Amino acid sequence: MHKKKVSESRVRLTEIVFPEDTNPYGSLFGGRLVSLMDKAAFLCATRHARKNCVTASMDRLDFLAPIGEGYIVEIEAHINYVAHSSMEIELNVSAEDTLSGKQVEACHAYFTLVALDSAGKPSPVPQLELQGEGEYNRFQAGKKRHQERLKKRAC
């Protein structure tokens, strides 16, 4: 199995917030944003693995700013770390006020997805071909988080 570059699976998902997506305060429902983030993570993992993938965990889901009705939501997803069959996807969400053009960082999270074979069992995925110090540092941090997840699961 050949290595793949982080750039080969990068995803940018763009949506607009409609009234039916908002709570009584006029802000995007958190669950709706998580659903969009899960979709972006799935697309990223599937591009990397070229196999069916499922979400195994979500870490550090931090809502940083409200996203108002009519805002443009942009979700960027990229792979930080790859184990045998699992992939850590980092998601960064920005929100843009369509009228003023003002942008804010709205949410950040790490999702772990697992590739599956045709029988629904975990399946190996390509390793990463890291390019540059930034990708190397994100890989090392992802590896540490992966080890922490495994420790928590063992308890």
Image (cartoon, rainbow, N blue to C red):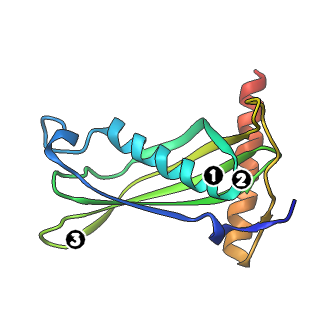
Tell me the quadrant of the picture where the C terminus can be found: top right
Badge 1 crowding class, 10 Å Cα cut-off, few under 14, some 14 to 19, many 20 or more, is many
Q: Earlier in the sequence, mark 2 or mark 3?
A: 2
The vertical placement of 37 against 121, above or below, is: below
| Nearer to us: label 2 or label 3 | 2
- Real-space Cα distance between discs 1 and 2? 6 Å
Q: Residue at horizontal 79%, vertical 51%?
A: 125
Q: What element carries label 2?
A: helix
Element under label 3? loop
Q: Distance between the residues labelled 1 and 3?
A: 30 Å
Q: Which residue is drawn at 47% across and 47% down?
A: 39
The CA distance from mark 2 to mark 3 is 36 Å
Which residue in the structure is indicated by mark 3?
Answer: 102
Q: Does 75 sit above or below residue 120?
A: below
- Amino acid type shown at disc 3: Lys
- What residue type is disc 2 on? Ala
Query: In the rendering, at what x and y percent does residue 52 appear?
Result: 66, 42
Q: Residue furthest top?
A: 155
Query: How many marks can you see?
Result: 3
Mark linked to residue 45: 1
Tell me, yes or no, whether the two marked residues, 1 and 2, touch with CB atoms within 8 Å: yes
Residue lying at the far bottom in this picture: please name it: 132
Residue 2 at x, y = what percent? 85, 65
